[in-house]
Image (cartoon, rainbow, N blue to C red):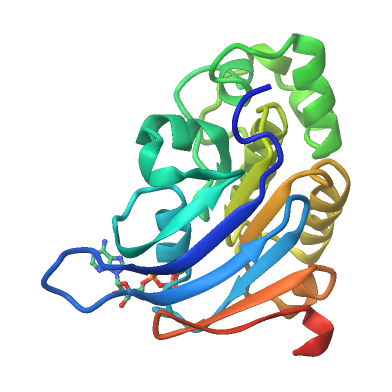
């Protein structure tokens, strides 16, 4: 029972800039997201999508406004705590030197059985089990880029949390893998508040809300059907 249990987000009139001399990259954005909602962020390159995610993680400073999660203004929460509470997946899937086990569960919180289950759910276990299983070393030969993306999903599934943030997780995967990822988002992360930057319209249709940015401003925030 620790903050943030539900994953309700209120973004109140926020503006943000990378430094005080440059023009804001986010301007006066207000919206709220209810726990369990799936929200896609769309917009052209440079519109501020990644910057909005960075603001949620307190990785860039607000010049105006507040972000409140489950009733707590995140500017009062230590940065490290915030980053440990959000489950994040970036565009660039990464691996650390070491075994499959340590890469899937870097903080040693899961049992071998749980790790194997997660790897089965992302359909990687069959392949890994013939190459050394949990003790296999994660060198460059073990996974393709798309498989590494799926592996990152397994890592996220093994973490506790209520908010999942994804920066274009499906940018370099094929259609089948994209479908698998969308299914995991609906099933395994059903109770999570999910905020995902998305380019493919196909993956946006079954989201609850689409958030469209243009030049750092919010221009749409509505259900996909309404847009
Ligand atoms: P893309 O689709 O290309 O990933 P985006 O919508 O994620 O684009 P952002 O990365 O949020 O866009 O960038 C918004 C604006 O902020 C751009 O004008 C960009 O040049 C600027 N910007 C991004 N990162 C930095 C940084 N580290 N320092 C200064 N300005 C930055
Ligand atoms: Mg970006």
Q: Which residue sits furthest front?
A: 71
Of residues 212 and 199, which is closer to you in this image? 212
Q: Residue at x 39, y 31 (%)?
A: 80
Q: Is residue 100 above or below residue 19?
A: above
Q: Say whether residue 105 is left or right of residue 115.
A: left
Q: Residue at x 32, y 74 (%)?
A: 25
Q: Say whether residue 204 is left or right of residue 12.
A: right
Q: Residue at x 67, y 28 (%)?
A: 160
Q: Position of residue 138 (x, y in %)?
A: 55, 26
Q: Say whether residue 135 is left or right of residue 44.
A: right
Q: Position of residue 202 (x, y in %)?
A: 79, 76
Of residues 123 and 74, which is closer to you in this image? 74
Examine the image and state in which quarter residue 64 appears. bottom left
Q: Position of residue 145 (x, y in %)?
A: 59, 49
Examine the image and state in which quarter residue 188 appears. top right
Quadrant of the snapshot with the C terminus = bottom right
């Amino acid at each position: 029972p620790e903050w943030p249990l539900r994953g309700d987000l209120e973004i109140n009139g926020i503006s943000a800039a990378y430094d005080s001399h440059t023009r804001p990259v986010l301007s006066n954005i207000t919206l709220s997201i209810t726990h369990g909602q799936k929200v896609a962020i769309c917009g052209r390159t440079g519109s501020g999508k990644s910057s909005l995610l960075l603001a949620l993680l307190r990785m860039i400073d607000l010049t105006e406004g507040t972000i409140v999660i489950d009733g707590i203004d995140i500017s009062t929460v230590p940065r490290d705590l915030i980053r440990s509470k959000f489950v994040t997946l970036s565009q660039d899937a990464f691996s650390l030197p070491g075994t499959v086990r340590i890469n899937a569960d870097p903080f040693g919180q899961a049992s071998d059985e749980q790790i194997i289950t997660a790897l089965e759910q992302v359909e990687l276990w069959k392949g890994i089990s013939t190459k050394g299983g949990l003790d296999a070393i994660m060198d460059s030969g073990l996974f393709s880029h798309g498989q590494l993306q799926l592996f990152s999903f397994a890592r996220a599934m093994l973490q506790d949390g209520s908010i999942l943030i994804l920066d274009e997780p499906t940018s370099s995967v094929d259609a089948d893998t994209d479908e698998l990822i969308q299914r995991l988002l609906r099933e395994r992360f059903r109770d999570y508040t999910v905020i995902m930057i998305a380019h493919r319209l196909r993956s946006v249709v079954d989201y609850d809300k689409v958030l469209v940015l243009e030049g750092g401003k919010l221009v749409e925030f509505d259900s996909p059907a309404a847009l």
